[in-house]
Image (cartoon, rainbow, N blue to C red):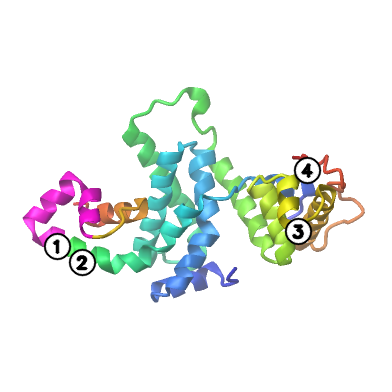
Amino acid sequence: MTTSEEQIAKLLRALPAVPAGWVQAAKELPAVRLELETIVERIESDERARALAVADLEAMLRAEGVEPTPVVVAHLRRRLAP
Amino acid sequence: MDAASDAQLVARCRAGDQEAWGVLVDRYARYVHAIVVRVYRLDSHDAEDVFQEVFARAFERLDTLRDGDALRPWIAQTARNCAVDTLRRSGRELPVDEVPEDVDDGVARLDEALTVHAALDRLSVECHEILDRFFCRDESYRTIGADLDLPPGTIASRIARCLSRLRDVLDPGGDRAGRKRTPTTSGEQVGQR
């Protein structure tokens, strides 16, 4: 890679810092996964839980004591997708 | 930063190593963020959703990645798919001049940028910090100087020195005599802030 210092500076600027909360939430996914699998099982086996999840997934998570961060919600939606 | 190759990192993640997952997220967070914000120009709310969706998909589907060394293009493609899905779902009709003109070029440029960022890890902690703060976090000489208890002029000269070192890391056999020198202590060539 041959490049000038001006180009290097531009390339450094091309990847600005990411809000810290976003990175932390993505990192925590493995830790919350087990908890989420329990919730998925309940949603899949309990009609009432399924109706709650469909109506308001985030509220359901809160009721289960899980913070509905975007990564948690995204992961659950993927797991519950038909 | 963990010096493991992508293939090693993928293998460790597949084995359930949570620390390795953290390293993977750190390694690709800026790249994914830049794809969704700079290439696809998603607003902050959509960008966060897509960012998390990319890592949720990556985490879930890591087992399907045949070659761990292909992690970077795989993540890029996942980010592109997620961004396009979001744009389609929102039904937004983007004006012609706002449609990403050449997504391939945009991502290729970010690939280069990622290589430069990876090289930062081979500099001293001090150089890494000062370059990251100035170029990536957009902090001014004054802010950095106040935190490090150094005058702004010293910050400018350190940025110049660290940038030169980074160039040496990226291009160890480069033509020193032929290269353009940046920036001076006045900082004019890196854009004084």
**Amino acid type assigned to the residue bearing label 2 in the image:** Thr
The reply to whether discs 1 and 4 touch (Cβ–Cβ < 8 Å) is no
Residue A72 in the magenta stretch? The answer is no
Residue A57 in the magenta stretch? The answer is yes
Query: Label 2, on which residue?
Result: A38
Query: Label 1, on which residue?
Result: A42
**Amino acid type assigned to the residue bearing label 3 in the image:** Leu
Residue A4 in view: no
Q: Where is residue A81 in the image (x, y as percent from the top left)?
A: 22, 52
Q: Where is residue A9 in the image (x, y as percent from the top left)?
A: 72, 47
Quadrant the C terminus of chain B occupies? top right
Eye-nearest disc, 3 or 1: 1
Q: Give the range drawn in magenta.
A: A42-64
Describe the element under mark 2 as helix, strand or loop: helix
Disc 1 residue crowd, few under 14, some 14–19, many 20+, Cα 10 Å: some
- Look at 78% across and 43% down and name the residue there: B190
**How far is disc 3 from disc 2 in space, using C-alphas?**
48 Å
**How far is disc 2 from disc 1 in space, using C-alphas?**
6 Å
The reply to whether discs 2 and 1 touch (Cβ–Cβ < 8 Å) is yes
Q: Which chain carries label 2?
A: A
Secondary structure mostly seen in magenta is helix
Q: Position of residue B186 (x, y in %)?
A: 86, 43
Describe the element under mark 3 as helix, strand or loop: helix
Tell me: B7 left or right of A65: right
